Image (spheres, grey):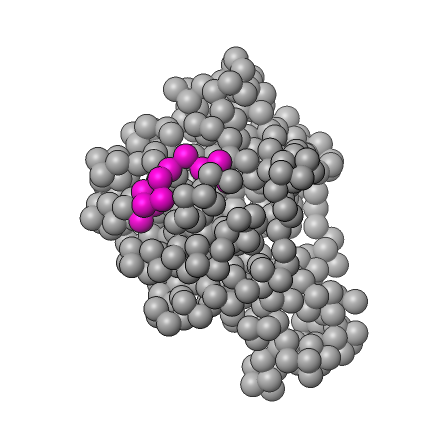
Amino acid sequence: MPGVLPDGEPVARDGSLPASARRAVGARGFGVYVHVPFCASRCGYCDFNTYTASELGGGASRETYADSVLAELALAARVLGDAPPPRVDTVFVGGGTPTLLPADDLARILDGIDRTWGLAADAEVTTEANPESVTPESLKTLRAAGYTRISLGMQSAAPGVLAVLDRRHSAGRATAAALEARDAGFDHVNLDLIYGTPGESAEDFAASLAQVVEAGVDHVSAYALIVEDGTRLAARMRRGELPYPSDDVAADRYLAAEAALGAAGFSWYEVSNWARSEAARCRHNLLYWTGADWWGLGPGAHSHVGGVRWWNVKHPTAYAARLAEGASPGLARERLAPDEQHMEDVMLRLRLASGLPLDVLDEAGRAGAERARADGLLDADAYAEGRAVLTLRGRLLADAVVRDLLP
């Protein structure tokens, strides 16, 4: 089931923000995230804020969902008022399975964002999709509406691994959908992989990587399986039906991904993300990782504007009800103190191939960086130029390096 939202101070009924937060909206870039909380079925490992038809209950539906999102967008326009972002640089529609909505509804949401704040001429517009939820026709509709990038949840090419993860699509469907997206004219196509699933062999993962490369995509995300409390997968492991993931196996899989993707012309730009070119990097995620502003639309969506971060009520019914009353769907918010902003900046920027300027670290942090360099976890050449950049071994131990830099 979906995880729990954090605590925070109440959000004003009208969603208003402090004047200080609205002073320079979008100065470091501005994105819009749209959460679509619907899934045809729940995958065994998933604790995202998503709902199947049987979990949804009354008061919310796919048919009226686009109207609710557009209502929140109108509220957002009122909140930012005379201090709107100069433009929308990126849009990312995630979930859930956004492509369970009709393509025309996704087009209507994007048009609403453009009419409200204006899309940049080179805006990156992404939708996530499960491979079985798109067709050549729906992909063409999305591309004609202005979607430029699609991210497909492949997870694995091995039928046995897909079964453990409770994925619905067949082993070859993800790469076929990637080819259909290219044929529909999408500029950029990503395939997501999960590695370290119980029962996955080294050969299984190698075959998954080979299929990704053969599909001709220009972006790959690969994540180690995380077992979240409250999921079916966690319950199966507690009962002893499946073994828990192995850190050593996960490290081996990561090294295999780096070798295979590197040989195929991909370069890492974030610990879990590889792209064939700078243009293929996910600009929306880079906004998150570099401290930019974004407005999150939809139940459970998080937003960040001018150092204020807030999150919406989780359930689609409560979300729709608040908007119908003319109230903000925001549940709670927090204002990030300078030390909190610094901690997040270090944690996120260190994961990027561009790294972190050493001069943002305090004396203890710089001493930790020197130890990490001496241990081969930070690149010596980048260090000499004043930046903390992870080596391949450092990427495997990124969390430990962060702890060294934030003593």
Q: Is residue 242 left or right of residue 175?
A: right
Q: Is residue 328 above or below residue 248?
A: above
Q: Nearer the viewer, residue 232 or 332?
A: 232
Q: Image point 64% across, 59% down: which residue?
A: 247
Range of magenta residues: 165-175
Q: Image point 41% across, 43% down: which residue?
A: 159
* Residue 187 placement (x, y as % from top left): 28, 54
Residue 407 visible (yes or no): yes
Residue 15 visible (yes or no): no
* Residue 65 placement (x, y as % from top left): 43, 24
Figure quadrant of residue 302: top right
Q: Image point 67% across, 39% down: which residue?
A: 240
* Residue 133 placement (x, y as % from top left): 34, 34
* Residue 157 placement (x, y as % from top left): 39, 49
Q: How many marks?
A: 0
Q: Is residue 328 above or below residue 253?
A: above
Q: Image point 61% across, 42% down: which residue?
A: 242
Q: Is residue 88 left or right of residue 374?
A: left
Q: Nearer the viewer, residue 402 or 112?
A: 402
SS assignment for the magenta stretch, majority: loop
